[in-house]
Image (spheres, rainbow, N blue to C red):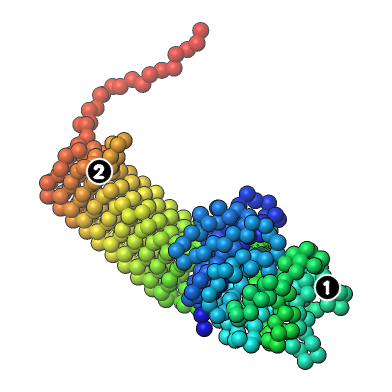
Amino acid sequence: MSLDIVILAAGQGTRMRSALPKVLHPVAGNSMLGHVIHSARQLQPQGIHVVIGHGAELVRERLAAADLNFVMQDKQLGTGHAVAQALPAITADTVLVLYGDVPLIEVQTLQRLLAKVSDKQLGLLTVTLQDPTGYGRIVRDAEGQVTAIVEHKDASEAQKAIKEGNTGILAMPAARLADWMGRLSNNNAQGEYYLTDVIAMAVADGLVVATEQPHDPMEVQGANDRRQLSELERHYQLREGRRLMAQGVTLRDPARFDVRGEVSVGRDVLIDINVILEGKVVIEDDVQIGPNCVIKDSTLRKGAIIKANTHLEGAVMGEGSDAGPFARLRPGSVLEAKAHVGNFVELKNAHLGEGAKAGHLTYLGDAEIGARTNIGAGTITCNYDGANKFKTVMGEDVFIGSNNSLVAPVEIKAGATTAAGSTITQAVEAGDLAVARARQRNISGWKRPEKIKKS
Ligand code: UD1
Ligand code: CA
């Protein structure tokens, strides 16, 4: 079976009350349309055709990719009209229709639906709802065979009582599509070309309409306003949370956990509340993440510990290393095994060797730091002269006293020591002590200034 996928994404989404086209509103850090495209790709179709209209230029710009064919629908004349716009590009034998504002659809559900399609059969995804108001209703005959879909606004009272609704997601043999599209009319309550009318046409042509249901109704829930968007968001997060728990992660509270990207996890990982994982995050066995941490595009090796309120972006934490509370590891931060970064420490493009330590109130930028080196509290690398960045290099077993300014480019060789309060501007040779501060001078009998009395 070869497959073409058509994603409907031309609608306006007035109820979002937004300058942003509806399908670009995010769920879990990715646009709704982005999620649908992601699912579509997993079905390995020969074509993905995205029908765009409202905000078309922005949608195209944000999502452009070599495997996507954007199809313009200038006027939104209905779902049938939308699919018809993609028709000239369809070459596969099966066509699957998805919606750009229905982001949680699962690949397995679509696979089950596609399994129903043959040249004699359509696959229709339906959902049974307590209150199907607004949905097209699935009309069945005495034998239970689907005969038509009737839109809510066109439905009789008896049809409105039907609880089985049309999700809109539909898979059909492509050979018939051009004929059906050509026969659509807009002679209905909304004056639109309804895609749903193909169901009755297919039945009249002797095809069978086979139905499937999603395991979870939220899979087929669209977002028309921001309240629904927030429901989709939370549902997505709970689903991600459950997936991670199934793999051996303890989440202190799945309701206070957010993933905005792709996360892989090991076993016996502990994640406290209000943790946000963004981009590509790799978490190995026995990692512990404290509350209120934001971790983006980072790798946490076995047994790494991240304490409360720590931010990581583009960082690697080695085995058994730890950071925080209140640490910030910016892109290019690498902690080797057992390295330690404490509170109010900022790292950028800094490499801490095995067992190296920066415990307190420190900025290390563009720095190469040897194993077991200890950086005193309040130390900063002066890596930027206002125009260029320079590197600070420290060997193994260096001891940097508290409150040092290390003016780069500078090298402090293995085993060297710098005195507290030093401003280091020159290389320090291996094993040497550098003292680079003004000598203390005591003035005895000092009188403090007194307040001048106003007359
Ligand atoms: C549609 C179905 C209805 C189903 C419901 C599920 C039809 C006629 N009706 O109704 O049976 O129960 O979805 O939510 O198909 N779109 C375009 N171009 C258009 C019109 C729509 O791209 O000209 C897109 C919209 O952006 C949206 C989707 O198609 O993503 C559905 O359109 P919408 O107008 O919301 O259809 P409904 O009236 O909800
Ligand atoms: Ca809708």
Q: Secondary structure at mark 1?
A: loop
What residue type is disc 1 on? Answer: Ala
Q: Residue furthest top?
A: 455
Q: In the picture provided, is 18 more to the left or to the right than 188?
A: left
Q: Position of residue 239 (x, y in %)?
A: 56, 72
Q: Position of residue 342 (x, y in %)?
A: 36, 54
Give the image quarter of residue 446. top left
Q: How many neighbours does mark 2 have within 10 angstroms: few (below 14), some (14-19), or many (20 or more)?
A: some
Q: Which mark is residue 390?
A: 2
In the rendered image, which residue does mark 1 sit on?
Answer: 155
**Mark 1 C-beta to ligand 1 under 8 Å:** no
Q: Position of residue 145 (x, y in %)?
A: 74, 88
Closer to viewer: mark 1 or mark 2: 1
Q: Secondary structure at mark 2?
A: loop
Q: Is residue 375 above or below residue 196?
A: above
Which comes before the other along the chain, label 1 or label 2?
1
Would you say residue 278 is visible in this rendering?
Answer: yes
Would you say residue 277 is visible in this rendering?
Answer: no
Q: Position of residue 78 (x, y in %)?
A: 70, 64
Q: Nearer the viewer, residue 453 or 177?
A: 177
What residue type is disc 2 on? Answer: Phe
Q: Nearer the viewer, residue 405 or 212?
A: 212
Give the image quarter of residue 322. bottom left
Count of numbered labels shown in the rendering: 2
Q: CA distance from mark 1 to mark 2?
A: 72 Å
Q: Residue at x 63, y 68 (%)?
A: 83
Q: How many neighbours does mark 1 have within 10 angstroms: few (below 14), some (14-19), or many (20 or more)?
A: some
Q: Which mark is residue 290?
A: none
Q: Residue at x 74, y 80 (%)?
A: 200
